[in-house]
Amino acid sequence: MSLPWWKKAVFYEIYVPSFCDGNNDGIGDIQGIISKLDYLRELGIDGIWLTPFYRSPKVDNGYDISDYFAVDRDYGTMADFERLIAEAHRRGIRVIADLVLNHTSTSHPWFQEARSAKDHPKRDWYIWKDPAGGAPPNNWESFFGGSAWEYDEKTGQYYYHAFSKNQADLNWTNPEVKKAMFAVIDFWQAKGVDGFRFDVINFLKTSGKFPDNPYDEKGEQIHRFDKDQEGILETVREICAECRRRPEPFLVGEVGSEDLQILKRYSGKGLLDAVFNFNLGSMEKFSVKRIFAELKRMEEEYTDEQTPTLFFSSHDMSRHISRFGRPPHEVETAKLIATLMLTARGIPFIYYGDEIGMRDLYLDDVKKMKDVQGIAAYEMAIASGKTEGEALKIANERGRDKSRSPMQWDGSEFAGFSDASPWLPLSDQSVHVEGQRKDPDSLFNHYRRLIRLRKAFPALHAGRYRVLRERDGVIFYIRSHQEEKILVVLNFNGRSVSFPAGDFLSEGSEWLFPGERRRIRPDEPLKLAPFEGVIVKI
Ligand code: NOJ
């Protein structure tokens, strides 16, 4: 049975404003992306996830859409987008679009109409409530901080926004909302997109009741009544069915939860193809035990119709090299994570810039901060009496600009990203594509080789685990497909180890990675440098 294309694919997330600036206004755009498609082919990826490029006031950098049928002027034109799809497809690269179905910008005409009068036919497209004794209807908190309710003077009611007050939540119990969004899906599929990454897809439904959310022992709100509500799976099923009116779209969901029991409900037959596992993706401390536990849990809990995802960085979190890497082993740690991502079972998502080891950005002045979440954290810290220095530190921690700095292509003033000063400062400029291309030991070439290996060996893209274990800080697994068996050994220790592979090796075993391919004797122990991963065909 042939596998759907996306099961074999390696994806690459492009944060649109930060990849490449084609018109030198300091903001990344579609022309810029087109100019780098050959680079992506050289890297070897199969699919691009494009963050939102639709028209937007960009309060949340495009996750606040004001026109679902237009390309934002900062990013180009519809003709540019069509060219991007054609040029990507010509190179065998598919494109999935990030789609925000949960909320629109408050500048979207739908919301403008809805807010114009209580009896406007579109009023019910959003979620409105009367004040409760002069206060918001309940204690629900927005994910960016503060109340999730914003008072609308004109009509004397509050509207609900799970994110910023400029992102009003749609009312998905209203069939007209569904119909309008299905038209959006259809429009972009007709343009040739190969699937979608659905933003916060588990937030779409509210239960229609609005009890207060409880708090945990640290005083943080538990979002019990504002996500994963009854009927949500039916809605997701309908959305997926709509998308699947065309052949083989890849549908991946951002399900905002760290509970695997919840995450796994959203994928499978008739549902999403995959969901991101944030237990891996946003893991804060480098922990071999936790990484292993997550691989194992996905293996044990997912059915055959559910495919794990492998990702360690995104536009919402710190880059893994900055989170996990400690001098002098930063690059080795990043290589190890890459080896894991590209050899374990699941769909890998590489975040732009991680393939060259771009570091997190630290902003030394709140005026340079662009992220709504970082700015909100700063304002709340100041309001609670913190000093400016403390507030800045908190804002850098909570804010997401850190992983959104412009891609570094070369050693020139603006790193080859643009001829103009970029919209966000550059991070450590010693890291760039040009420098790494030439260096056979670079992180970039490490990624390239692994992607090629993953493609060349079906066990690495289609195989099941025969063995999946962790011992003394070493994760090892065997993946097999038909006759092919591949052993991967990953040393998470900061010291060299010798791995006794005798039980697994045979006369015909072959060392695949790193270095040259060669025969390996069955009694030869595998020697692994600190944070090294090796791959052997057994
Ligand atoms: C998740 C996106 O990844 C994030 O960047 C955005 O702020 C929220 N959803 C709201 O759309």
Image (cartoon, rainbow, N blue to C red):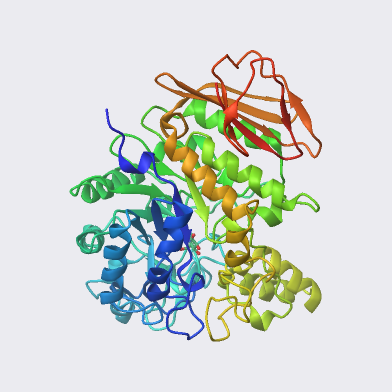
Q: Position of residue 151 (x, y in %)?
A: 47, 76
Q: Which of 427 and 202 is in front in this view?
A: 427
Q: Nearer the viewer, residue 7 or 530?
A: 530
Taking depth in this image into account, of 240 and 193 the one nearest to the observer is 193
Please state the horizontal and vertical placement of residue 150, each as a whole percent of the image. Answer: 48, 73
The residue at the point 30 percent across, 64 percent down is: 87
- Residue 288 visible in the shown view: yes
- Residue displayed at 58% across by 72% down: 371
Q: Where is residue 167 in the image (x, y as percent from the top left)?
A: 44, 70
358 displayed left or right of 250: right
Residue in the foreground of this view, choosing between 232 and 399 = 399
Instruction: Inspect this view and state whether residue 199 appears.
Output: no
Up the image or down, 408 lies above or below 421; here it is above
Q: Which image quarter is the C terminus in?
A: top right
Quarter placement of the N terminus: top left
**Relative to 308, residue 64 above or below:** below
